Amino acid sequence: MKKEVMLVTGAGQISMAIARRMGFGRKVILGDKKKENADAIAKIMNDAGFDVVPMEMDLSSRESILTLIAEGQKYGEIKMLVNGAGVSPSQAPVEAILKVDLYGTAVLLEEVGKVIAEGGTGVTISSQSGWRMPALTAEQDELLATTPTEELLKLAILQPENIRDTLHAYQMAKRCNEKRVMAESVKWGERGARLNDIAPGIIVTPLAIDEFNGPRGDFYKNMFAKCPAGRPGTADEVANVAELLMSPAGAFITGSTILMDGGATASYFYGPLKPEQ
């Protein structure tokens, strides 16, 4: 029996929370670079009544992305995409961050956009981090949004001499994600589908815990202590936003980024988190 298909990348807490919220009654194809992570999340969900197929999948590889899509198409039309895959500044070097978070996301949105069914929806997870980076020029933003995927990593602004460190690489990748969502949403719209982006602040996940224990741990702890919410967020709160964006209630929202960071960005510009001059 054919089912609507949800593609999910990244077997983490945010991906699982969104898949549990929106994946009922659908075939969920879950890809992660570490197959054991996908297996573990699939077992939790299947034991709870979902229908999940785990796969090994590398977001930095177009071939791997196409394999994920092809697997989904065996079961029916691809109706939903949740992109929660990525690496953080404490987990990977600059080159890997740009290859996975920036290039890989661009390829995924492009390839799924070629096959997404009418009425389909997608969300990708970026980060508040891209909002704290100084504004780029309009020309640079357009290059990030529209440069052919195989040319992206050749852009001058992404060359090693122009990337300060892994945090800067991560910020550039997340800025690119948001611009890419805007450009790709126009193409998705031609198929009657919608695409949006969620930029979370500090969400308690294994990835975040790596950051708490990494070289910028004190920075992140100070951030959520001094943001208006006074705490980090949870994966289920991200799923709340994804549910709006992916349901009929969000039918007029496409090409958008929803910043949900407990007010950390607001505090960074206009409150106690503002850097000293």
Image (cartoon, grey):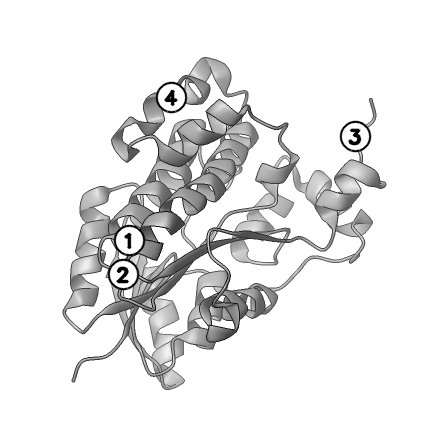
Report the Cα–Cα distance between label 4 and label 1. Answer: 23 Å
Name the quarter where the C terminus is drawn. Answer: top right
Q: Is residue 273 visible?
A: no
Q: Amino acid at mark 2?
A: Ile
Report the Cα–Cα distance between label 2 and label 4. Answer: 28 Å
Q: Regarding mark 4 in the picture, which secondary structure is present there?
A: loop
Q: Amino acid at mark 1?
A: Gly
Q: Nearer the viewer, residue 269 or 249?
A: 249
Q: Amino acid at mark 3?
A: Pro
Name the quarter where the N terminus is drawn. Answer: bottom left
Q: Please name which of the two marks, 4 or 3, marks the residue nearer to the observer.
A: 4
Q: Which residue is mark 4?
A: 155
Q: Amino acid at mark 4?
A: Leu
Q: Are marks 2 and 1 in contact (CB under 8 Å)?
A: yes
Residue 221's x, y, as percent?
A: 73, 47
Q: Please name which of the two marks, 2 or 4, marks the residue nearer to the observer.
A: 2
Q: Quadrant of residue 40?
A: bottom left
Q: Quadrant of residue 152?
A: top left
Q: Nearer the viewer, residue 219 or 184?
A: 184
Dot label at residue 9: none
Report the Cα–Cα distance between label 2 and label 1. Answer: 5 Å
Q: Please name which of the two marks, 1 or 3, marks the residue nearer to the observer.
A: 1
